[in-house]
Image: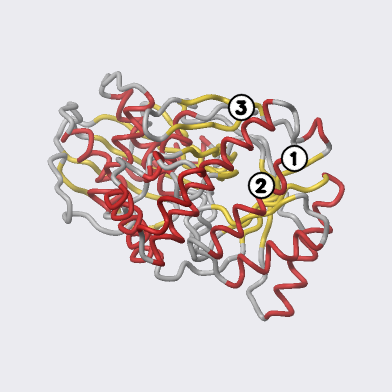
Amino acid sequence: MIDERLSRTTEAPSTATVSTAFEDAFGRRPDGVWAAPGRVNVIGEHTDYNDGFVLPMALPQGVRAAAARTADDRVRVVSLQEPGEPVGFPVDVRPGDVTGWAAYVAGVVWSLRSAGHAVGGVDLAVDGDVPAGAGLSSSAALECSVACALNELFDLDIAPADLARLAQRAENDFVGMPCGVMDQMASVACEEGHLLFLDTRSLRAERVPFDTASHDRTLLVIDTRAPHRLVDGEYARRRAACEAAAETVGVRALRDVAVDDLPAVLPRLDDEQQRRVRHVVTENARVEDVVHRLRDGDLDGIGPLLTASHASLRDDYEVTVGELDAAVEAALSAGALGARMTGGGFGGCVIALVAADRAEAVFDAVREAFATAGYAEPTAFTAVPSPGAHRVR
């Protein structure tokens, strides 16, 4: 069955729950509660660190941060997902000082202060419901909820795009994950009912309406529950290959290579770089095509583009695994209009655009395929475009 607890349009986790956790840990009420969502990327995978185009949407699932200033120069943070005593560190924390889940919080403090923003002592409690390890940007949701809290608590007046860049720097340079800026921008800048068409070079953003219900369609998110395999090293390797290829062909980033340029560009590269470049260049074109179709009201027309994206990620970028491929194949065989992996790959989720009355049947087909292949049982929920980061109390 599709998980109706996750297929909701109301915000969660509960403000009361995270506020109570704060009071239990620190013996006083928080000054406020801030929420930031996870995201699902409709199309535009591995293009963001190539200065390209992406098309994510915010999910109802996310992270809430209850926070209050303190009189000292220390940060203390508790998580409902990581029971135990508060993790504490000084505000002048440095990379390597904090590890584990709290490094994402420490990284935001470090990033803000490194940029000259006067962040002082603070107590924090965080609670999230983005499925862990699913490639739905639980880390960006944590970073952005904390960043939004600090931005307001300390009157920093940082614009959303700049806040996203600072949160990205926390993940890149403090945590050590070389992600692009899409996840953080989606978390801070998305709007309810819309996808975010983002130029990751300029951070120019356009909100594109995405009303599946009026077309009797739904976006099904299938969590394959496949564990991420070698994701950190493989992700960095692909980024390095793209940067080397851009240098070889004499462009700032692969964003500057057009589809029509590929016949001249590809022979200058080695076999691996050819595959990586072909994916990035054609994926950028697919993002723009999807946006054009959505502007024209052609929702069903994006289906084949989603499927083509998956094939490119499988064959040229080589970031799929058996569970992702099996989920896409089963969904398409059961009548999905289009399907693709979403996120960094090597595990995580698949999205499928389906007729609203076929969502259960499509998911049942995926479950049956997984049972036959001996994979862990997947889960699924339907996704609707939700608001970006904001104060909730």
Is residue 124 left or right of 59 when viewed as pictured? left
Quadrant assignment, res 230: bottom left
Inter-mark Cα distance, 3 to 1: 15 Å
Query: In x, y percent, where is residue 91?
Result: 16, 39
Residue at 23% x, 38% y: name it.
109
Name the mark on residue 301.
1
Amino acid type at mark 3:
Val
Q: Secondary structure at mark 1?
A: helix
Report the residue marked by disc 2: 305
Residue at 33% x, 30% y: name it.
163
Query: In x, y percent, where is residue 192?
Result: 61, 28
Residue at 16% x, 54% y: name it.
97
- As drawn, 391 above or below 42: above
Q: Secondary structure at mark 3?
A: strand
- Pointers 1 and 2 in contact (C-beta within 8 Å): yes
Q: Name the front one of labels 3 and 1.
A: 1
Amino acid type at mark 1:
Gly
Q: Earlier in the sequence, mark 3 or mark 1?
A: 3
Amino acid type at mark 2:
Leu
| Few, some or many residues within 10 Å of mark 1 (<14, 14–19, 20+) | some
Query: In x, y percent, where is residue 228?
Result: 47, 67
Query: In x, y percent, where is residue 146?
Result: 35, 37
| View extreme (right): residue | 357
| Few, some or many residues within 10 Å of mark 2 (<14, 14–19, 20+) | many
